[in-house]
Amino acid sequence: MSRSRRHTPICGHTIVGFTHGEQWFKRQAWHRVRRAVKMRLLAVRVRRLHVARWGFEWPETPLLPTLRELSNPWGMPKDGKQWFGDCREDARVWRRCMTK
């Protein structure tokens, strides 16, 4: 059993079927961000190559993408949070609620 404790008596809910919470969705979102960054950096390298070889400029490439541009945090499987405020009367129940 874990010895770590929660600092606040709040726990998140996930959708049934996703036992690991948002882990899979976060992994997919960061995969999309890394891929988009690679593609934009490659476009900058190609642009510099064209300038060096043929001397003409392409339009400036946009800034690197952010996580919010490529994924929706509201679309992840968290349903909400639950407050364990009513179990403070019993110390044993409180310890159980505050275990991670």
Image: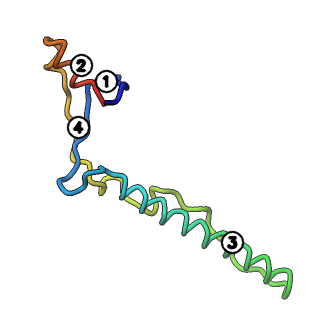
Residue 48: x and y in percent read 79, 76
Q: Which residue is mark 2?
A: 95
Relative to residue 11, is residue 63 depicted above or below? below
Q: Which mark is residue 81?
A: 4
Residue 37: x and y in percent read 59, 65
CB within 8 Å, label 1 to label 4: no
Q: Look at label 1 and name its amino acid.
A: Thr
User: Separation of disc 2 and disc 1 at Cα?
Assistant: 12 Å
Q: Which residue is mark 1?
A: 8
> Which residue is pictured at 20% across the width and 28% down the height?
83
Q: Residues within 10 Å of mark 4 (few under 14, many from 20)?
A: few
> Which residue is pictured at 65% across the width and 71% down the height?
61
Q: Look at label 3 and name its amino acid.
A: Glu
Q: Which residue is mark 3?
A: 60
The quarter of the picture where residue 51 lies is bottom right
Q: Which mark is residue 42?
A: none
Q: Secondary structure at mark 2?
A: helix
CB within 8 Å, label 4 to label 2: no
Labels 4 and 2: the sequence-earlier one: 4
Q: Secondary structure at mark 3?
A: loop
Quadrant location, the C terminus = top left
> Which residue is pictured at 36% across the width and 58% down the height?
25
Q: Secondary structure at mark 1?
A: loop
User: Separation of disc 4 and disc 2 at Cα?
Assistant: 19 Å
CB within 8 Å, label 3 to label 4: no
